[in-house]
Image (spheres, rainbow, N blue to C red):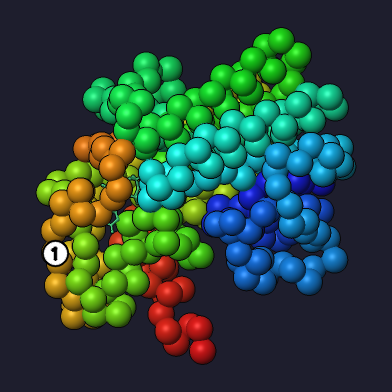
Amino acid sequence: MKVFITGGAGFIGSHLAERCIADGHEVWILDDLSTGAIENLDPVLEHPKFHHRIGDVTNEELVSELVDRADVVFHLAAAVGVKLIVERPTHTIETNVRGSEVVLKAAAKKDKLTFIASTSEVYGKGVKLPFAEEDDLLFGATTKSRWAYACSKAIDEWLALAYHRERGTPVVITRFFNTVGPRQTGRYGMVIPTFVRQGLAGEDITVYGSGDQRRCFGYVGEVVESLMRLAKQPAAVGQVFNVGNDREISINALAELIRERTGGRSKIIHMGYEDAYPDGFEDMERRIPCVEKIEAAIGYRPTMPVEDIVDRVIEAMSPEEDA
Ligand code: UDP
């Protein structure tokens, strides 16, 4: 199979590329290296079946050329990370909406199976837990720029479903819940790599807000496995799937876990959101995926315990590993 991955040098994209190469597929990736990094591709860079292009996902000509070559397209290129999103809302909206438009237009011309990466953020401030694919979406005010990300991704979903309905384009939408693993950087605000870096350096571990907010963390390898299975499942076409682990942990408990696992030298401190994020931030308390739909479709869902995920991240980020 020939696979084209936009955002292939990013966190999830690079793991997906590696997995596709391991499975014997031919892989092309496109990345502008804005948040991705070429080092993420070190394990596959020299492989004869791996090809990369540095460029923008809004470049129609380049995207068409790569889509035309592929049997399946995974569109993962996007502005991601809460910090980046609230700091650069214009870039977020334009990259996410325009990028999906370009990819879907090219895919529709040749009827290519296309995965659109969406996010649990689209559930917004929903309070009916767990979040199921058919639930209503509840966004905050437009003055809070965090929701621009959710809205841009919701538009991507609508556009993909519109192509499917009107043109028969084979699309699959995956809503990724908090996904974690080696290579994820804390630079754009993600909590686990941030806490692990702080713990390993013996710095204060910074819990934002009360720390009673809870999240469910899924291991990136299991998210990739879910994608590979969905790609083989014709019944997945035209559908939206939650992809995530449904076990919850509070941010306070996570901080304690990471403090212990990184040698116990750090102090856990609490910071107000106003000190942690620029204006335009609003947190959500809980976010649990309903995984019934994906499990029924592919007979699989991420189950790796957060303790094991944290250990893998620590191992990957430990200084000895870099030596
Ligand atoms: N968070 C935190 N300290 C940090 C980074 C994040 O307490 O240094 C909190 C954040 O406010 C949120 C949770 O951890 O409640 C998860 O944040 P992340 O940005 O990883 O993902 P989100 O679920 O918000 O998209």
The residue under the point 13% across, 58% down is: 270
> Disc 1 beta carbon < 8 A from ligand 1?
no
Can you give x and y, in whole percent of width and height, for residue 45 in the image? Answer: 74, 68
Relative side of 320 to 96, left or right: left
Where residue 91 appears, x then y in whole percent? 53, 42
Residue 153 spot, x, y in % from top left: 51, 31
Residue drawn where x is 19% and y is 44% of the image: 213
Tell which of 277 and 53 is nearer to you.
Answer: 277
Horizontal side, residue 248 vs residue 221: left or right:
left
Would you name the residue on which mark 1 appears? 269
Q: Residues within 10 Å of mark 1 (few under 14, many from 20)?
A: few
Q: Is residue 308 visible?
A: no
Quadrant occupied by the N terminus: top right
Residues 84 and 114: in front is 84
> Of residues 194 and 314, which is closer to you in this image?
194
Which quadrant holds residue 282?
A: top left
Q: Is residue 21 visible?
A: yes
Left or right of 258 in this view: 19? right
The answer to whether 312 is drawn above or below residue 84 in the figure is below
Q: Residue at x 36, y 37 (%)?
A: 146
Quarter-wise, where is residue 44 in the image? bottom right
Residue 313: image location, x then y, percent: 41, 67
Picture quarter containing residue 49?
A: bottom right
- The amino acid type found where label 1 is placed reads Ile
- Tag 1 secondary structure: strand
Count the numbered circles shown.
1
Q: Reply above or below: 248 against 198.
A: above
